[in-house]
Amino acid sequence: MNISQLITPETTFCNISLSSKKKILEKVSSELAKSIECPTEEIFESLLSREKLGSTALGNGIAIPHGRVKSCNHATAVFLLLDEPVDYDALDNQPVDIVFAIMVPEKADNEQLKCLAEIAKVLSNPSLVAQIRNAHCNAALLEIFNKATEKFH
């Protein structure tokens, strides 16, 4: 699965203003619900349950919240660049401004689970992260991510 296929212009948001981790998860849940046709609350609970196991913040201002829901039949994602970083309970104590949230089917196969690792690998590139942080609109943010993932496929 090509991770660039997980996000679309409709699921990419640049310079969005959210004030807390909870608000981020609510926004992500709302947007994922549009793609998955699943109640927003069910997605939110899945993301929140995963966060209770440990923060999905990778460090360096990046978080990859993720979860599973029954009504999801294929991996889907939402990509956010916040206008201001927010506290996300990251192990490095750095606030988060880049959020790549992914929802997979309840019985996700290995290919779908590999998406998480691939996203983490892509977002571990410092020059890419700098480009993402300098994106000025949704289209630019999507293009930067898609170009970065081309080398993986």
Image (cartoon, rainbow, N blue to C red):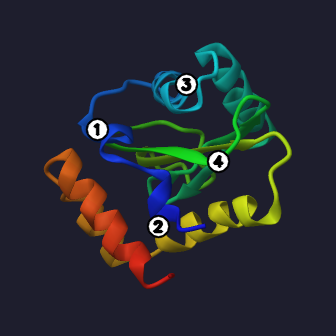
Q: Is residue 50 left or right of residue 136?
A: right
Residue indicated by mark 2:
123
Q: Residue at x 71, y 59 (%)?
A: 112
Quarter of the rendering occupied by the N terminus: bottom right
Q: CA distance from mark 4 to mark 3?
A: 20 Å
Return the disc, 4 or 3, that comes first in the chain's sequence.
3
Check disc 1 and give the amino acid type: Glu
Residue 27 position (above or below residue 137): above
- Compared with 100, 87 (above or below) is above
Identify residue type, mark 4.
Answer: Thr
Query: Mark 2 against mark 1, which lies toward the viewer?
Result: 2
Residue 37: image x %, image y %? 59, 24
- Compute the Cα span from label 1 to label 3: 25 Å
Circles 4 and 2: CB atoms closer than 8 Å: no
Secondary structure beneath disc 4?
loop
What label does residue 84 carry, if any?
A: 1
Between disc 4 and disc 1, the foreground one is 4
The residue singled out by tag 3 in the image is 33
Under tag 3, what secondary structure? helix
Is label 1 in a helix, a strand or a loop?
strand
Name the residue type under label 2.
Answer: Leu
Instruction: Pick whichever of labels 1 and 3 is earlier in the sequence.
Output: 3
**Residue that lies at the very extreme toward the bottom in this rendered image:** 151
Of helix, strand and loop, which one carries label 2?
loop
Crowding at mark 2 (Cα within 10 Å: few <14, some 14-19, many 20+) = many
Labels 3 & 2 near each other (Cβ < 8 A): no
Q: Residue at x 55, y 64 (%)?
A: 119
Distance between the alpha carbons at the discs numbered 2 and 1 = 18 Å
Picture coordinates of residue 152, whole percent (x, y):
50, 82
Amino acid, disc 3: Ala
**Residue 38: where, in percent of width, then height?**
64, 21
Q: CA distance from mark 3 to mark 2?
A: 24 Å
